[in-house]
Amino acid sequence: MLKFEKVSVSYGRAPVLFDIDLEVAQGEVVAILGSNGAGKSTTLRVASGAVSSRAGQVWFDGAEITNMPSHQIVARGMAHCPEGRRLFSGLTVEQNLHLGVRSKSARKVAPATLDDVYTVFPILKERRNQLAGSMSGGEQQMCAIGRALMAKPRLLLLDEPSLGLAPIIIQEVFEVIRQIRQTGVTVLIVEQNVSQTLDVVDRAYVIERGRVVLEGTAIEMKNDKNVQRAYLGA
Ligand SMILES: Nc1ncnc2c1ncn2[C@@H]1O[C@H](COP(=O)(O)OP(=O)(O)O)[C@@H](O)[C@H]1O
Ligand SMILES: [Mg+2]
């Protein structure tokens, strides 16, 4: 469904991704792991068209989308829930959710999609008229994921959804990812919470200093000595 072929990205003159090869098949949940500054967010950004690539190709559903404008990529069925949530704090929960509707086809089914989002996140229904900025970090994260789902994506990119949340809320976030997967949405997730992530994903890539240094199934990752030492506190 998503394929990177030797994708390289620079910010200005600074190269940050080098020849990234990556694949996500339909129905899979795949993680990108790696330390701070490794290039995980940049990998999601280049997939969704938020940054452009200097070299290489990105494919989505068999079509090349390299350096396509992000609104066209959204319209093709990819949604990006960015790092740091980026909600409009002065708008209500429901207004923020509606901002996720970004294509004609999503607009047609928006009322039904909103019901689906409220089924996954009952708290958002309860709080639908509350200002997003007045909600807890966990609720804001749910709202950010809900907003991405309003685009009716077939592929959802999630950037550090558990960052800064309390352990009990982190569990809820991972529960939501399980639910999203059950609805048939393919997910590519960036996470620092490696142990819990490997419990919900099929496969993972480890990126270090802009390069893929390891890839494998979740089980292979859990059993990998380097992964255990670097990310699982073993
Ligand atoms: N907008 C930007 N402009 C310049 N450099 C950036 C920008 N965003 C990220 N970087 C740099 O690119 C590298 C990769 O960043 P990022 O993809 O955000 O890493 P990660 O998500 O793995 O923490 C880091 O060295 C970071 O400082
Ligand atoms: Mg990041």
Image: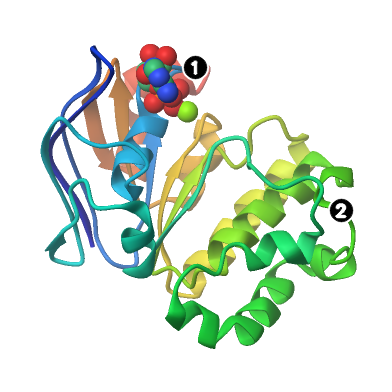
Q: Nearer the viewer, residue 89 or 201?
A: 89
Question: Which of the 4 quarters of the picture holds residue 21?
Answer: top left
Amino acid type, residue under disc 2 in the picture: Leu
User: How many tags in the picture?
Assistant: 2
Q: Which mark is residue 234?
A: 1
Q: Which mark is residue 131?
A: 2
Check contact, mark 1 vs mark 2: CB within 8 A. no
**Horizontal arrangement in the rendering, residue 183 relative to residue 53 (left or right):** right
Q: Is mark 2 within 8 Å of ligand 2?
A: no
Which marked residue is nearer to the observer: mark 1 or mark 2? 2
User: Which residue is at the front of the view, 5 or 88?
Assistant: 88
On the image, the x and y values in percent for residue 128 come to: 84, 66
Q: Earlier in the sequence, mark 1 or mark 2?
A: 2
Residue kind at label 1, given as amino acid type: Ala
Up-down relation of residue 57 to residue 107 (above or below): above
* Circle 1 crowding by C-alpha within 10 Å: few under 14, some 14–19, many from 20: few
- Left-right relation of 114 to 216: right
Dot 2, crowdedness within 10 Å: few (<14), some or many (≥20)?
A: some
Q: Quadrant of ligand 1?
A: top left
Residue at image point 60% right, 81% down = 110
